Amino acid sequence: MSDKSLIKRPIPKGSELLPVVGIGTYDTFNVGRTAPERTELKQVLVEFAALGGTVIDSSPMYGEAERVVGDLTAELKNREKYFYATKVWTSGKQAGIRQMEQSFKVMRTARMELMQIHNLLDLDTHTQTLKDWKASGKIRYMGITHYHAGAHSELEKLVKTNTYDTVQFNYSLAEREAEARLLPACLDSGVAVIVNRPFAQGNLFGKVKGKPLPAWAAEFDCTSWAQFFLKYLLGHPAVTCVIPGTRRVMHLKDNMLAGVGRLPDAALRKRMAQLLDAL
Ligand SMILES: NC(=O)c1ccc[n+]([C@@H]2O[C@H](COP(=O)([O-])OP(=O)(O)OC[C@H]3O[C@@H](n4cnc5c(N)ncnc54)[C@H](OP(=O)(O)O)[C@@H]3O)[C@@H](O)[C@H]2O)c1
């Protein structure tokens, strides 16, 4: 019988293991302050932690998302269970510092596990600040992010500089450009990979609507299309963690199962891609 615990993988330049399924907050956590808007999100965070999840990804670009995470974890009194990853998304050294300080405030935390430079905006300026903050212990890891393939060659150059602990980018069965050069470069350089938009912002579900899972999905302990999409990514040796976004407890539970049991090998992954391409 397969192991039922959530798989963990190392941050190559760090000293800890990350559970392979995290959660994104773009759009899904951008809600107002009333209870009805937040009730299910709170339960999403409860279940996420109960199932062994830790990585919560946010950004000041995501409206109220950082604040909602901070408020809900304060209500739950369980901030220590999570690995907070947020971003800086502005130009100028002082503006960057102000924005990051604001993220600490609204997320109600004295430490940030990971700070990332969103869409590489004013990269050199923020890189210097993040180096200083890492040296002083204010953040544990520093990273870079982007969301479309047009930036992959730039990301590839940057991961080879040995400056960043993590890189976050788009990768899914619908967007496989990263496989050509970026993912191998991350593996070679020992940079942890955080995958954003793992369902191509939900679009993958439209492609398989009404279609049954192939019987061979059982060979890698897969019981839903969401698990199929995520296990494909986790089957790549360079991927450290995927961060699907959801506002639903039912979907969260489904997504967490992608990090449990067997993962597809290279031959199965090829078959998975062929199946999607044929739809
Ligand atoms: N750095 C960047 O530039 C960047 C850009 C984009 C995103 N991101 C990060 O990456 C995270 C993920 O990307 P994303 O949220 O844009 O897209 P995504 O994770 O590819 O897709 C999210 C969509 O999938 C649906 N979904 C989730 N689980 C499901 C399930 N089990 N069954 C059916 N539908 C399901 C969600 O709807 P429900 O809410 O109904 O479940 C939501 O509409 C973001 O939240 C953000 O943290 C970063």
Image: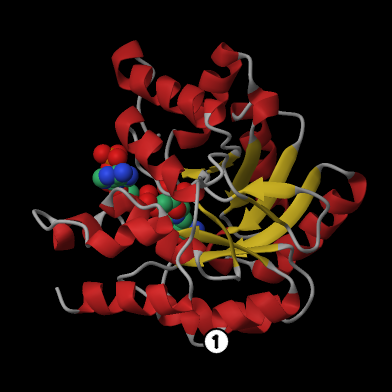
Which one is in front, 228 or 115?
228
Q: What percent of the width, then of the height, locates residue 24?
A: 46, 45
Examine the rendering and report whether any part of residue 236 can be seen: yes
Q: Residue at x 52, y 31 (%)?
A: 51
| Outermost residue, left side | 210
Q: Is residue 25 visible?
A: no
Q: Is residue 251 left or right of residue 239?
A: left
Q: Is residue 246 above or below residue 70?
A: below
Instruction: From the top left corner, tell me how far across and down residue 252 is, in percent.
Output: 39, 36
Above or below — where is 255 with respect to 159? above
The residue positioned farthest toward the front in the image shown: 1
Left or right placement of residue 132 versus residue 148 in this view: right
Query: On the image, numbered disc 1 is attached to which residue?
Result: 181
Side of 5 relative to 232 (left or right): right
Give coordinates of residue 79: x percent, y percent.
65, 24
Secondary structure under tag 1 reads: loop
- Closest to the observer: 270 or 174? 270
What residue type is disc 1 on?
A: Arg
Residue 2: percent from the left, percent from the top?
A: 52, 47
Q: In the figure, 167 relative to 27: above or below?
A: below
The residue located at (45%, 41%) in the rendering is 256
Q: In which quadrant of the rendered view does residue 168 lie?
A: bottom right
> 241 or 134: nearer the eye?
241
Nearest to the observer: residue 234 or residue 41: 234
